Structures are given as C-alpha cells and as structure tokens.
Image: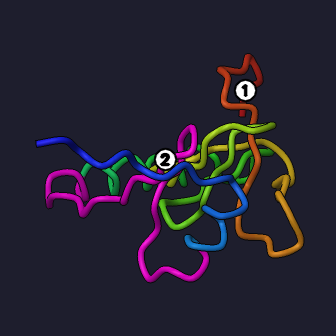
Amino acid sequence: MATQPRPYLTPQQYLEIDRAAERGSEYYEGEVFPVMAVSLAHDRIYDNVSASLRTQLQNGPCRRVGSNVRVKCRLAGPYFYPDVLVFRGAPVLEDTKSSSITVNCRPSSTTC
C-alpha cells in the first residue's frame, strides 16, 4: 500500500492554520506535526523545572515562558512549542500579531 505524500506548507500557510487551531502544531521543513498530550510524569518534570527557573531568574535580565508560546528559529527555521524557553532581554516578535517569539536556536554563551 502506497502512502500519500504529505503536502508541503509554506511558513505563512502553517501560521494561518496554527493561529486558527484549538491546539498548536509544530512546523519543520514544510511539514506540520501535532503537539501531543503529555504524561503526568512529563507534567511534573515541567512543573519542577519551571519553578526552579522562576526562582533562579527572579530579578535578572532573563525571562521564562512556557509551552503556550510558539517559537520560531531565525530566518526560515522551524516553529516549535518548547516546554520552557529562557531568553534574555525583550522578546523579538515575528510580526504584529505577537504570536511567535523569534530566537537564534543556537547555544549562547550569554548568561542570565
């Protein structure tokens, strides 16, 4: 049985679909992948990491955001919904809809 090829979506097409959807999806090289539900163990790990980061980043130059924020890797890169993202300074928004934070997606030597 042959499988159907997945249609290629442009980043703009993906954003239109994702903004209208009830649940987010991730985008990589023209393909869209649904964000899956997590287990209780995953949720507990996220909660512990998030709480620890909140304490460590308090009153510093870095901010923490959770999995409801879409992240775009600079240029034509993929879009993700990471469990946790830490960034320094003001967020760089992709467009006027303020729905995606743009990041370099490379390890940085900058400390928070």
Which residue in the protein does label 2 denote? 31
Measured from the top left, where is residue 32 in percent x and y?
Answer: 46, 53
Above or below residue 37? Residue 82 is above
Q: CA distance from mark 1 to mark 2?
A: 33 Å
Span colored in magenta: 19-44
Q: In the depicted view, which residue is nearer to us: 71 or 6?
A: 6
Type of the residue with mark 1: Thr
Q: Quadrant of the N terminus?
A: top left
Q: Residues within 10 Å of mark 2 (few under 14, many from 20)?
A: some
Dot placed on the residue nearer the N-terminal end, 1 or 2: 2
Q: Is residue 42 magenta?
A: yes
Q: Residues within 10 Å of mark 1 (few under 14, many from 20)?
A: few
Q: Is 88 positioned to the left or the right of 32 in the image? A: right
Which residue in the protein does label 1 denote? 111
Above or below residue 6? Residue 18 is below
Q: Is 107 positioned to the left or the right of 68 in the image? A: right
Measured from the top left, where is residue 27 in percent x and y?
Answer: 53, 49
Q: Residue furthest front?
A: 1
Measured from the top left, where is residue 76 in percent x and y?
Answer: 75, 38
Callout 1 secondary element: loop
Q: Residue 71: which disc?
A: none
Q: In the depicted view, which residue is nearer to us: 87 or 33?
A: 33
Q: In the depicted view, which residue is nearer to us: 52 or 2?
A: 2
* Residue found 71% across the figure and 43% down from its top: 87
Q: Quadrant of the C terminus?
A: top right
Q: In the depicted view, which residue is nearer to us: 66 or 23?
A: 23
